[in-house]
Amino acid sequence: MQAKTWHLGDARQSLVLASFAGRLPEVIYWGPALPGKDDLQLLAAASLTDVTGGMVDRNAGISLSPEASQTFTGHAGLSIRDTDGNILVPAFLFENETATENGLRLEYSDSHHGLTIVFDLSLTAEASLFKLQTRLESSNVILVDWLAAPVVPVPAHTGEMIEFSGRWCAEFLTRRLQFSPGARVRDNRTGRTDHAHFPGLIVCNGATTNTQGEAYSFHYGWSGGHKMVAEELADGRRHIQFGHASSSKEKGKSFQSAALYATYSAEGLNGAAIQFQRYARDRMVTGARSPRPVHYNCWEAVYFDHKISELKSIASHAAELGAERFVLDDGWFGRRDDDTSSLGDWFVDDRKYPDGLTPLIDHVKSLGMEFGIWFEPEMINEDSDLYRAHSDWILGRKDQTRGRQQLVLDMSREDVRSYLYDRIADILKNNDIGYIKWDHNRVLPIVAAAQTIGVYELLDRLRANFPDVEIESCASGGARVDFGILERTQRVWLSDSNDALERQRIQHDAALFLPGSVTGSHVGPRRCHTSGRVLDMKLRAWTAAQRHMGFEMDPRELDDAETATLCDATNWWKANRHWTMQADIHRLDSSDPAVIAEQQMARDGSRFVVFAVLARTSDQILPHPVRLTGLDPDAMYSVSLANRNEAPRLSRGNPLLKEKDIEVSGRYLVTHGLILPWRFPETIWVLEGQRL
Ligand code: GLA
């Protein structure tokens, strides 16, 4: 049987599609790059499966939108109704194909229902990452309950999935699950990406580690809450679906999924992670200052208690530590003395700032720092002038449960968006501001895609008119971290936890998708405000130096030793950021579960830095060698233990790296690894390497 076939691929991976008898296309191969010799017609024919007793006479394909009309008995890719509520069951047929910049667009229609479904499939040039998107056009008004981004099967030998959960101060928790008959469904009805629902999935198997084995990695680039279906059909085949959260029901004639990003790796989880990191850093995020400036954020120093003299003194100390950007957090507007009032009143508080923000901004600028400011545009307090004037602007019922005492503005309304645009634009026009921290501190009372689309519109308008203002996405820490928001922002506040040990874990897992250049990491107060824990400044400073570095304590609390340690780490960061902020982050496999380690590798392979944290005491007395990754086995490398002077007195022996730098082959580093000195828990080793 003649089929239509398509191949999308590069040197790393191939994706082959086939459309039989004009029906919706199916992914018939996805994996390592094919050698270019295969006859795609033959692959199409070879993909057809047998039938036996108890089955229908033709197995429905796992198409880009599996159809109930083809007797697909799993979770269909599309679920729609007419305006009377009748379920529509379309059967699409081939209409058109077009080549696009890095891929193709395939159009299928159902003339009976007046529907067209369009699949945009591309393989990005900057990184080996598929970008897959589905659009649905209808000649009549319909209701869409589910529209999956292009659906892809995953092979039977990848029987495990790594999914993401989390909470406030513990984002990006990973969990490994086995596939089993039926569907694993994650439906995030918070209306935002949320701490507990990062929209990602990695399909792998028991042999997959950070550095080895196969992985199929997915991320749905949407900030409004997603639904994921990872289904094993009764016949054993498996497929992955991502779309908007089920309750984002939409009515109209034109609908679109967000982009589903996906990649295959034969080099373990890192092979996939690096594609996501590169795409985010090199393609998606635009307008980021280079080099990335060291942040200072005043939130945990002063909270709502803004006094100009104090803030000036803090800014002076922050600049001495090396800060290059000062961010004035919550508390500068309306009558915002605590979190019960003023959201919506984006006017400078003239009690706290009688001459406006200019005196503080001038002081900050005189110290050589850029000035940034906090907004939470989508939110409103009942105790605000805005609410007193426009109580009808809120999203959801008036008697809804509040979140942090606040309500949400209905961002689908043009008048709401234009009020917010005017207020933010006014502050930006009248003050020398280079940065916005854009917050979102509660779940939504109802889930609606229109809310997310409205926020994107507002951000796009501000970006277009203030192209030099960078934006950070924050939502009680990392509750809005995704590629939808990163298309419009330059940084994410990964977590409200400044506890360096917690941060190590969160950063490590977030690196499955995020590059260092967009990932904020701050040195917090000595006694961490969210964990109550006191950790050594060495660990705190180096942990921040692993990502986009910043400080968030009152710098006047630092003693001389802490100041010296922080300055050293900050100077190191500044001297290296030209390459570390462009580096690939490889998570290292550690045979000691107490160790969290990563290797940041320069894009040209000429140098690397390894951060190896002992998060708790090890079960065994001798440190396991730290094995590196991604090195040229035949090249020689010089390796230095950058902080060898931090070995404790209980380290009584003389492992070589404690004494001097060593020169060894890539093969030795990757296979045997490096023997490090014994140390206390909650400490970090920093190793620097150069290719010779
Ligand atoms: C959220 C953010 C914090 C801070 C506060 C201000 O919790 O995550 O970093 O900006 O809001 O209210």
Image (cartoon, grey):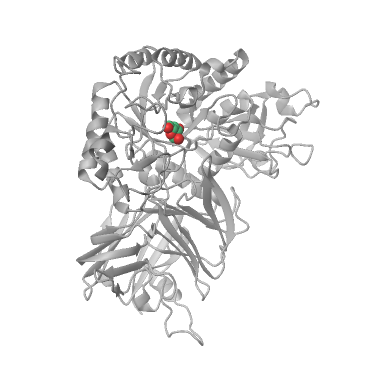
Q: Quadrant of the N terminus?
A: bottom left
Above-or-below relation of 413 to 434: below
Splitting the image into 4 quarters, where does residue 246 fall? bottom left
Instruction: Give the residue displayed 42% in from the left and 58% down from the top.
Output: 227
Nearer the observer, 43 or 558? 558
Number of marks drawn: 0
Where does the image place residue 220, in percent across and percent down from the top left?
41, 52
Nearer the observer, 669 or 250? 250
Q: Quadrant of ligand 1?
A: top left
Q: Quadrant of the C terminus?
A: top right
Splitting the image into 4 quarters, where does residue 659 fall? top right
Apparent side of residue 459 relative to residue 512 in the rendered image (left or right): left
Apparent side of residue 215 relative to residue 107 in the rendered image (left or right): right
Above-or-below relation of 86 to 352: below
Where does the image place residue 453, in percent across and percent down from the top left?
29, 48
Above-or-below relation of 684 to 620: above
* Residue 466 visible at all: no
Nearer the observer, 237 or 560? 560
Where does the image place residue 318, in percent across and percent down from the top left?
47, 17
* Residue 288 visible at all: yes
Splitting the image into 4 quarters, where does residue 364 fall? top left
Residue furthest bottom in the image? 53
Instruction: Give the residue displayed 43% in from the left and 85% down from the top.
Output: 57
Above-or-below relation of 288 to 64: above
Where does the image place residue 620, in percent across and percent down from the top left?
78, 40
Nearer the observer, 489 or 654? 489
Instruction: Give the residue displayed 57% in from the left and 42% down from the top.
Output: 587
